[in-house]
Amino acid sequence: MKGKILLAKMVNARIDYLGFFVAPFRNSSGGKPHIVIFKDYPDVLNIKQLCLALGVGKNTAYQLIKNGDLKSIRIGKVHKIPKIWLIEYVLGEAS
């Protein structure tokens, strides 16, 4: 964690309350800064990766999906969660 904090100071970023590296950057048109989260995760997550990203257990992850709080795609018995849906959930933008 110490290395993350040092890196965050170097690039004018921060570490949020869940330990995510949040770095502001400008888009190519010079518009509003964007926030980068879950950078080290694939575009589509499985349950194990979701648990790591949110810092929760499997039961909680499945409960979020079952309650409809977090959208997922079910392929057979496997749940897949696109990263954009995870980001929407974390930012409170999920519908």
Image (cartoon, rainbow, N blue to C red):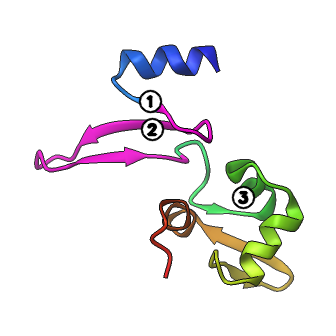
Packing grade of label 2 (10 A; few <14, some 14-19, many >=20) is some
Residue 30: x and y in percent read 11, 45
Left/right placement of residue 91 relative to residue 13 reads right
Say left or right for 65 vs 7: right
Instruction: Report the residue marked by disc 1.
Output: 14
Mark 3 residue type = Leu
SS for dot 1: strand
CB under 8 Å between discs 1 and 2: yes
- Label 1 to label 2: alpha-carbon separation: 5 Å
- Which residue is found at the position 62% from the left and 41% from the top? 18
The amino acid type, in three-letter code, at marker 1 is Arg
The magenta region covers 15-38
Does residue 27 lie above or below 91 as drawn? Answer: above
Q: Secondary structure at mark 3?
A: helix
In the rendered image, which residue does mark 2 sit on?
22
**Of the image marks 1 and 2, the number of the one nearer the N terminus:** 1
Instruction: Give residue 55's position: percent from left, percent from top.
Output: 75, 48
Vertical arrangement, residue 53 with respect to residue 85, above or below: above
Which residue carries the number 3 mark?
Answer: 50
